[in-house]
Image (cartoon, rainbow, N blue to C red):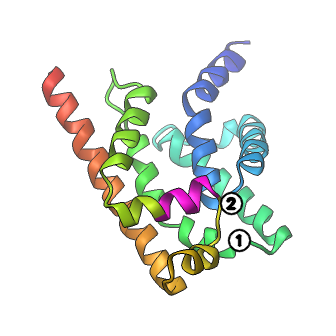
Amino acid sequence: MIRDRAFELIFREHNRMITAYLHSVVGDWEAALDLTQDVFVTAHRRMHTFDPERSIGAWLRGIARKLAGNWLKKRRRHRECLVAGNDIDEVFALFDSPASDERWDDRLRALDECLGRLPENQRKVVDLFYMARATAKEIAQKLAVVEKSVFQTVWRARRNLHRCIQQTLQCREAANG
């Protein structure tokens, strides 16, 4: 019972982050939700293999990455999401070592603020790629650019989000400390 209660806390703490991570990789909210359930079922079964020296978030994302890869292979579509999704680990790494008093809501607010600070071209591509679930090819056609530039813009946006989230959380910590 104690183990199940502890796992319930792990689920509550990491559920939204894993779903967001999976959506960034597979580009489909429904699939991301289904895969999130699979991640936690797998993690529950394999909890005995978890190394407490590692970040639980990174371990869960490792499981998620494998399940998402299998999902994408079966569907043979959205390959560009998997390729581009590999860089997203850098952004999600911010979630691996929260300050003891930091909450997920603070991190999500920081992400939301930082999305609003992106340059317009990056915000537009991020909205199309993640919210509208458009493929890189569709985005390139819509914006009259080459497909490769869409991936570069997504990469730059992720890099900018990573930096912005780090700075925002550090500023909040300094203001509260």
Q: Where does residue 69 sit, x and y in percent of width and height? A: 72, 65
In depth, the one of 123 and 16 nearer the eye is: 123
Q: Find disc 2 in the rendering and name its residue.
A: 26
Taking the image as shown, residue 22 lies to the left or right of residue 154, namely right
Type of amino acid under label 2:
Val
Which residue is at the far top? Answer: 1
The quarter holding residue 68 reads: bottom right
Q: Where does residue 116 sit, x and y in percent of width and height? A: 35, 47
Q: Where does residue 132 sit, x and y in percent of width and height? A: 63, 56
Q: Quadrant of the C terminus?
A: top left
Q: Any mark on residue 78, and which?
A: 1
In magenta segment, residue 74: no
User: Residue at position x 59%, y 75% from top?
Assistant: 136
Q: Residues within 10 Å of mark 2 (few under 14, many from 20)?
A: many
Q: Which residues are magenta?
A: 125-132
Q: Quadrant of the N terminus?
A: top right
Query: Dominant secondary structure of the magenta stretch?
Result: helix
User: Residue at position x 77%, y 73% from top?
Assistant: 77
Instruction: Choose the circle earlier in sequence order: 1 or 2.
Output: 2
Taking the image as shown, residue 64 lies to the left or right of residue 104, namely right
| Number of callouts | 2
Q: CA distance from mark 1 to mark 2?
A: 7 Å
